[in-house]
Image (tube, rainbow, N blue to C red):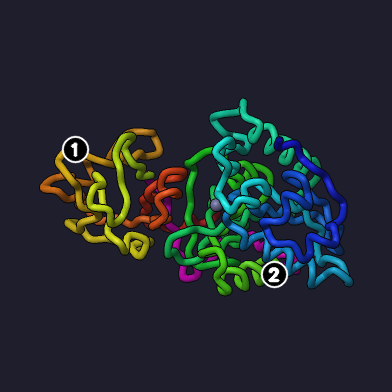
Amino acid sequence: MTSLRRYDHVPEAMLKATSIELDQLLGGPALFYLDGTRKPPLFITVLQHGNEPTGFEAIQQILQKYHAAGLPRAVWLFVANVSAAAEGKRMLDSQSDYNRAWPGTADTATAEAALMQEVVDTVTAGPLFASVDLHNNTGSNPHYGCVNELAPQYLQLATLFARTVVYFKQPVGVQSLAMARHCPAVTLECGQAGEHAALSHAVDFLDACLHLHHLPDQQVAPHDISILRTVAVAKMRPGVTYGFDDESLDVRFRGDLDKLNFGPIAAGETLADLNDDRGMPIIVSNDDGEDISAALFEAADGKLTLRQPLTPSMATLDVGVIRQDCLFYIMEHMSLPDGGD
Ligand SMILES: [Zn+2]
């Protein structure tokens, strides 16, 4: 069941609950309207992926902090995949990925797509200040924000969190891509779950957002931002077995794969050992959906190597995440637009 629960206050028990306990406490995905001094509200989304609790823990600290005095700005809070959170998973096997189900998704027939449509219809019925969707990742990555528009307010919001900003238009169905049509929107990648630095950074960001009078509409200074664009996504070819150390697997990736995030990696470097020469074990799709793996990689002599330098992001040592999401994204530096578009 994914029908949306609505609240106009935070249950006392939620101020102390862990993300694992929310399913029992809330009974399903929940949307809160929490009044505050400034309007319009900031839209905050947490726990789209059940094993990424930092966003929830951060808003919990904010709610504790302003419990008595009231929030500095009104908030729409969407506590998303609580049933996956109860099991400590990104999503349940029976679910589609919440963060591929927002308006614009290719698959509108799912229960998750109906849920996200209801959330968007509700929060966009009035004006919004901005939208922030908080995530963790599983590999070693810098903290960064993702935007889907390059207009000044979007980049101002993202650089309030970090100097590194990723711009993307694929995959579709992502929260910030849907919300970018309505207000400045950012997806935050806060580092790994359980890290103190991840949580304190997210708390500081939310607190700063709630106190902002407005988002500046002049463009971010070039030295204050490093923007990369996603140009392709690498996934495993179906039927190929893969991992990190088991000799019997078709593909064994190097153990420091996630340390290569935001590289660049030089041409000629080896990413994986291959058990045989059955051909390219990965599919690299560009924004047009074309397989460009042969242009970027070579699978020969028992090795997967790079034909040209490239910069990955979101590479992880978690085989489950590789299966459910991807091996990594391929990035390219881009220059800052002058005035937005
Ligand atoms: Zn996530």
Confirm whether residue 307 shows in the render: no
Q: Compare residues 202 and 79 and report the one nearer the observer.
A: 79
Q: Is residue 323 left or right of residue 303?
A: right
Quadrant that contains the N terminus: top right
Magenta-colored span = 207-232
Residue lying furthest top: 109
Mark 2 to mark 1 CA distance (whole Å): 50 Å
Residue 220 is situated, as x and y percent measured from the top left of the image, at 55, 64
Q: Compare residues 205 and 17 and report the one nearer the observer.
A: 17
The image's mark for residue 279 is: 1
Residue 174 is situated, as x and y percent measured from the top left of the image, at 57, 43
Q: Kindly identify which residue carries mark 2.
A: 208
Residue at 51%, 64% in the rendered image: 192
Q: Is residue 140 left or right of residue 88?
A: left
Q: Is residue 5 left or right of residue 196?
A: right
Quadrant position of residue 281: top left
The kind of residue on which mark 2 rests is Ala
Per the image, label 2 sits on a secondary structure element best described as helix
Per the image, label 1 sits on a secondary structure element best described as loop
Label 2 crowd (10 A; few <14 / some 14-19 / many >=20): few
